[in-house]
Image (cartoon, grey):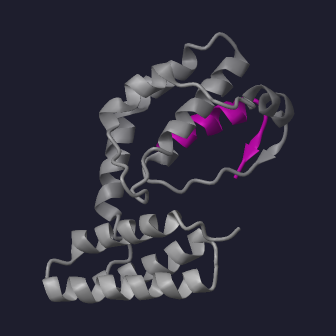
Amino acid sequence: MRIHPECIPCIIKVRFREISQHISDRGEMLKAFSEILRIVAEYVEKDVPNPVIAMHAFRYVKEITGLDDPYSDYRRKANKYALKFLPYAREFIEKADDSYGRFRRACIVSCLGNLVDPGVAGYKFNPKQWSEMLEGSNFRLDDTKRAFELMHGKHILLLCDNSGEIVFDRLLVEILKENECSVT
């Protein structure tokens, strides 16, 4: 996987936003922005993958801000919103007619959890849109039937990377366990 040119401005914009939220001194901000540009340029020249560039730049943000988790406030709020929405998501899943339908709806809910991602430039998560998205959600490519057929009795590895996401993934884990899957 190589860096795509259109990814470079996104990486920079997200890191700039993180710095701006935690540093108010103009001079310190300019110094930090300059270093972000240097870091990104260094790794772009080496043609390393996007996530590696973003990781190195994010490590610098953590260093310059002195914060182990620059998103701690965001995560707290996202988890709070997700927990408020949890009963609606559970009801949405339980309204399905059969085991496959519940699995499919749990997959939809799990995917909606991925919307809680502050690391995307130009995207602002709005929790008020969750219920609208839930009822109108569908997969462009829907392999849930095949996944459902293959999953029984299997071991499933579930990766969670966004704040708020685990709240919804928990519902999917419940459905997987109902279908005799072990989940890590």
Q: Residue at x 22, y 82 (%)?
A: 29
Residue 118 versus residue 170: which sits nearer the camera?
118
Farthest residue in the left direction?
A: 25
Farthest residue in the top direction?
A: 97
Q: Main secondary structure of the magenta part?
A: helix
Residue 57 versus residue 63: which sits nearer the camera?
57
Q: Is residue 175 above or below residue 54?
A: above
Where residue 160 sits: x, y (%)? 57, 53
Q: Is residue 3 above or below residue 85?
A: below
Question: Is residue 9 toward the left or the right of residue 73 in the image?
Answer: right
Q: Residue at x 17, y 88 (%)?
A: 27
Report the number of numbered marks: 0
175 in magenta:
yes
Where residue 91 sits: x, y (%)? 48, 19
Where residue 21 sits: x, y (%)? 23, 68
134 in magenta:
no
Farthest residue in the front direction?
A: 5
User: What stretch of residues is rendered in magenta?
Assistant: 167-184
Question: Is residue 105 toward the left or the right of residue 57 in the image?
Answer: right
Residue 134 versus residue 155: which sits nearer the camera?
134
Q: Is residue 147 above or below residue 37?
A: above
Question: Is residue 141 toward the left or the right of residue 120 in the image?
Answer: right
Q: Residue at x 48, y 81 (%)?
A: 40
Indicate the quadrant containing the N terminus: top left, top right, bottom left or bottom right. Answer: bottom right
Instruction: Indicate the quadrant where residue 119 lies.
Output: bottom left
Q: Residue at x 72, y 52 (%)?
A: 157
